[in-house]
């Protein structure tokens, strides 16, 4: 028996809370713990790739390949010994709408793709967009995390009906009285959903993107990089029981897809 990949989705309670940067940091941290990681960008903005020094003019990605009728798995990039990236690809606004319609019409598409990749990775991490429900149809995911900041906008949105999932506070500034108060309120009212740690506000995170690197590579001793490492360790403790529940025979007849990854991309100099 072997355990399939653990799938995790990261999505913002609202836009601009740092989902792509955090997912890049988390993938890097998990790889540092010896895990095999696939990062999948489901966002038309196609920004996740910029954390790994992919050329700005690179247009390939799984969505581009899907629309063009090419093998989607050939769009993967090898980022190291144990980490791969599937960018979204460059699409026009009209093509993005076309992809949304297609994904709604084929709601099992990514469930099948996940199954085909299960034996190749320990983790499949999805960067989910805002307000594109078709792009969020991934089948069953083991861990769904909603990212938020300790501000009034996120607090108001938490009072409204929204997707279930664990809650993770990003860019937390302990010097802010408002943020400390909001976190205390959430700890009292949302304790069953709130993750036991926060991601601290740290200038190393935007600087890492400017250097086209995940923060753990750019500034491994920074506070936010250490936060990402702690989060990765916590996730490993959650993965063990999940894997036990979902163990499948090694000789499963499920069709497998081997990623025909492009050449690895070295991190940009600096940092």
Image (spheres, rainbow, N blue to C red):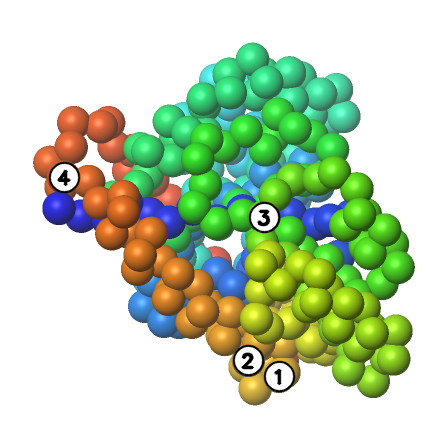
Let me know if residue 56 appears in the view.
Answer: no
Screen quadrant of the C terminus: bottom right
* N-terminal-most mark, 2 or 4: 2
Circles 4 and 3 in contact, beta carbons < 8 Å:
no
* Distance (Cα) linking label 2 and label 4: 36 Å
**Left-right relation of 68 to 2:** right
Would you call the spot at circle 2 few (<14 residues within 10 Å), some (14-19), or many (20 or more)? some
**Residue named by callout 3:** 165
* Distance (Cα) linking label 2 and label 3: 23 Å
* N-terminal-most mark, 1 or 3: 3
Nearer mark to the viewer, of 2 and 1: 2
**Residue named by callout 1:** 222
Q: Quadrant of residue 185?
A: bottom right
**Residue named by callout 4:** 249
Q: Quadrant of residue 97?
A: top right
Q: Which mark is residue 226?
A: 2
* N-terminal-most mark, 4 or 1: 1
**Left-right relation of 115 to 87:** left
């Amino acid at each position: 028996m072997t355990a399939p990949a653990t799938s995790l989705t990261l999505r913002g309670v609202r836009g601009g809370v740092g989902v792509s940067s955090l997912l890049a940091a988390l993938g890097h941290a998990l790889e540092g713990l010896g895990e095999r990681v696939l990062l999948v960008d489901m966002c038309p903005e196609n920004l996740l790739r910029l954390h790994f020094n992919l050329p700005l003019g690179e247009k390939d990605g799984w969505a581009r390949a899907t629309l063009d009728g090419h093998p989607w798995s050939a769009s993967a990039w090898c980022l190291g010994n144990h980490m791969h990236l599937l960018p979204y690809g460059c699409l026009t606004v009209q093509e993005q709408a076309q992809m949304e319609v297609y994904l709604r019409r084929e709601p099992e598409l990514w469930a099948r793709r996940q199954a085909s990749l299960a034996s190749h990775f320990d983790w499949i991490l999805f960067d989910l967009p805002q307000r594109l429900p078709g792009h969020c149809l991934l089948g069953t995911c083991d861990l769904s995390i909603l990212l938020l900041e300790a501000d009034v906008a996120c607090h108001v949105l938490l009072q409204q009906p929204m997707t279930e999932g664990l809650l993770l506070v990003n860019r937390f500034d302990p010097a802010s009285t408002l943020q400390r108060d909001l976190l205390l309120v959430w700890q009292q009212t949302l304790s069953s959903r709130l993750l036991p740690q926060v991601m601290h506000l740290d200038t190393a995170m935007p600087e890492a993107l400017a250097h086209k690197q995940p923060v753990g590579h750019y500034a491994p001793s920074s506070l936010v990089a250490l936060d990402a490492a702690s989060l990765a360790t916590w996730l490993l403790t959650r993965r063990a029981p999940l894997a036990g529940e979902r163990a499948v025979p090694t000789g499963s007849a499920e069709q497998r897809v081997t990623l025909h990854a492009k050449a690895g991309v070295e991190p940009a100099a600096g940092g």
